[in-house]
Image (spheres, rainbow, N blue to C red):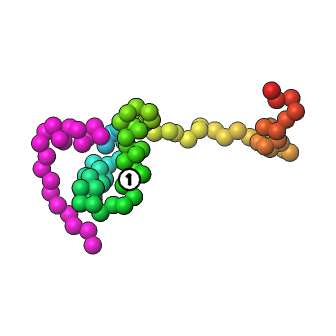
Amino acid sequence: MVMATNLRLRPDAETALREAAERSGRSQQELIREALDRYLGLDAAQAARDSLDDLVRRGLIVLPKEPLSKPHRRLKLPAGVTSLGLLDREDRI
């Protein structure tokens, strides 16, 4: 069972939440649930996410500005040629 609730934020908190959601690629709702779980001590797996968030905050990991897209076309190898064969060649430096 899930409870729905309304939350009223100060304008500065609203802006910060929106920007954090955009930077992380996560929803505002997800960030609020995570913060509440952390505050209440309900999420044991939070430590791993905290360390990742810390790396992002310190600039050691930079999140992409846009999501990665799929390639427009796939590479087709000739019959009998494999990607492993291309990598495992004698003439490679």
Q: How many numbered badges does the structure rendering display?
A: 1
- What residue do we see at 15% from left, 57% from top? 6
Image location of residue 83, percent across then percent down: 76, 42
Within the magenta stretch, is there residue 10? yes
Q: Does residue 61 appear to the left or right of 50 in the view shown? A: right
Side (left or right) of 20 relative to 14? right
Amino acid type, label 1:
Ala
Which residue is at the front of the view, 45 or 16?
A: 45
Q: Can residue 29 be spotted in the picture?
A: no
Within the image, what quadrant is residue 92 found in? top right
Seen at 63% across and 38% down, the residue is 73
In the picture as drawn, the residue positioned furthest to the top comes out as 93
Q: Can residue 42 be found in the magenta stretch? A: no
Q: Quadrant of residue 85?
A: top right
Q: Which is nearer the eye, 80 or 45? A: 45
Instruction: Assess disc 1: are there few (<14), some (14-19) or many (≥20) residues with their C-alpha within 10 Å of its C-alpha.
Output: few
Kindly identify which residue carries mark 1: 47
Question: Which element is circle 1 on?
Answer: helix
Whether residue 89 sits left or right of residue 54 in the image: it is right
Residue 11 location, x and y as percent? Answer: 13, 39
- Magenta stretch: give its range: 1-20
Residue at image point 37% right, 41% down: 54
The C terminus sits in image quarter = top right
Q: Is residue 49 above or below residue 1?
A: above
